[in-house]
């Protein structure tokens, strides 16, 4: 659901900005194929409407007038950005509680979605479909919606304790049921006679251990033959 929120929200804002701002693409003149009349509009007669001077395909001309922001960059960073955040949190890359060495492959998995999104944006500039600032602004929208989408789907964005816990959907229900069962089974699994504690300390052989009045000693245990 978080990925869905990210893509839908980012697409809505970039389409809105594209309709309100737009701007010409780098290949606009090749599509427009203009023929200037003798006199234009405005002061000095040097302003022209696209429909007045363009002789190319009207659908391609309309597409060439909608450059800002880049929709492909927005979608790429909204989707792949969300995936990078998901991998970063669920692979525990930034978890300060882990003391063991993490594999280098974790960093590669986290960076791979960002590299793919950057590659998609770069090809748009190299193919003269967008200017650099179009792609940068589209990427910024995608990253922002990815962060917000993850925050809506999971309980936290930066806390290592809760950044993997879902906030909505079936996963949340399954997680709550799992915790409820753990709480209900705790007296049976932990051992009311302290046997589990003793096994953790390496005491597994007989004689048997029984729970005694807690006032007798700190552990409340006594050895019986």
Image (cartoon, helix red, strand yellow):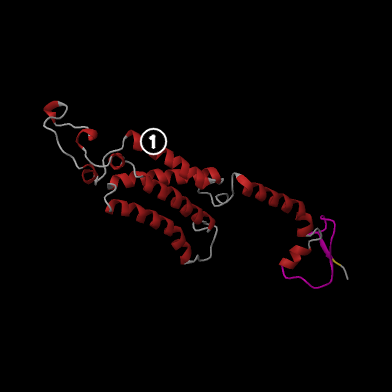
What is the quadrant of residue 115 in the picture?
Answer: bottom left
The spot of residue 172 in percent (x, y) is: 63, 47
**Front residue of this view, candidates 74 and 225:** 74
Horizontal arrangement in the rendering, residue 86 relative to residue 111 (left or right): right
The spot of residue 197 in percent (x, y) is: 74, 63
Q: Is residue 199 above or below residue 130?
A: below
Q: Is residue 223 above or below residue 110?
A: below
Q: Is residue 26 above or below residue 119?
A: above
Q: Is residue 214 magenta?
A: yes
The spot of residue 62 in percent (x, y) is: 30, 39
Horizontal arrangement in the rendering, residue 14 relative to residue 31 (left or right): right
Q: Residue at x 28, y 53 (%)?
A: 127
Residue 218 visible in the displayed image: no
Range of residues picked out in magenta: 201-222
Identify the residue at the far right of this view. 225
Q: Residue at x 50, y 44 (%)?
A: 149
Residue 205 visible in the displayed image: yes
Horizontal arrangement in the rendering, residue 103 relative to residue 172 (left or right): left
**Front residue of this view, candidates 6 and 64:** 64
Main SS type for the magenta part? loop
Q: Residues within 10 Å of mark 1 (few under 14, many from 20)?
A: few
Q: Is residue 20 above or below residue 129?
A: above
Residue tagged 1: 16
Horizontal arrangement in the rendering, residue 174 relative to residue 194 (left or right): left
The spot of residue 64 in percent (x, y) is: 28, 42
């Amino acid at each position: 659901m978080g990925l869905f929120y990210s893509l839908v929200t980012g697409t809505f804002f970039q389409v809105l900005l594209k309709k309100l701002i737009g701007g010409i693409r780098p290949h606009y003149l090749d599509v427009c194929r203009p023929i200037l009349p003798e006199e234009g509009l405005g002061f000095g007669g040097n302003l022209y409407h696209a429909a007045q001077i363009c002789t190319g395909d009207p659908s391609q001309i309309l597409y060439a007038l909608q450059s800002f922001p880049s929709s492909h960059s927005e979608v790429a960073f909204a989707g792949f950005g969300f995936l990078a955040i998901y991998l970063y949190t669920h692979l525990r890359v930034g978890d300060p509680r882990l003391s063991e060495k993490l594999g280098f492959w974790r960093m590669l998995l986290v960076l791979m979605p960002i590299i793919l999104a950057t590659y998609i944006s770069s090809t748009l500039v190299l193919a003269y479909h967008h200017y650099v600032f179009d792609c940068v602004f589209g990427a910024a929208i995608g990253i922002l919606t990815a962060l917000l989408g993850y925050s809506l789907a999971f309980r936290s964005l930066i806390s290592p304790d809760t950044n993997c816990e879902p906030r909505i959907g079936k996963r949340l229900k399954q997680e709550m049921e799992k915790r409820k069962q753990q709480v209900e089974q705790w007296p049976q699994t932990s051992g009311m006679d302290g046997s589990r504690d003793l096994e953790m300390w390496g005491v597994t052989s007989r004689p048997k251990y029984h729970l005694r009045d807690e006032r007798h000693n700190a552990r409340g245990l006594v050895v019986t033959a």
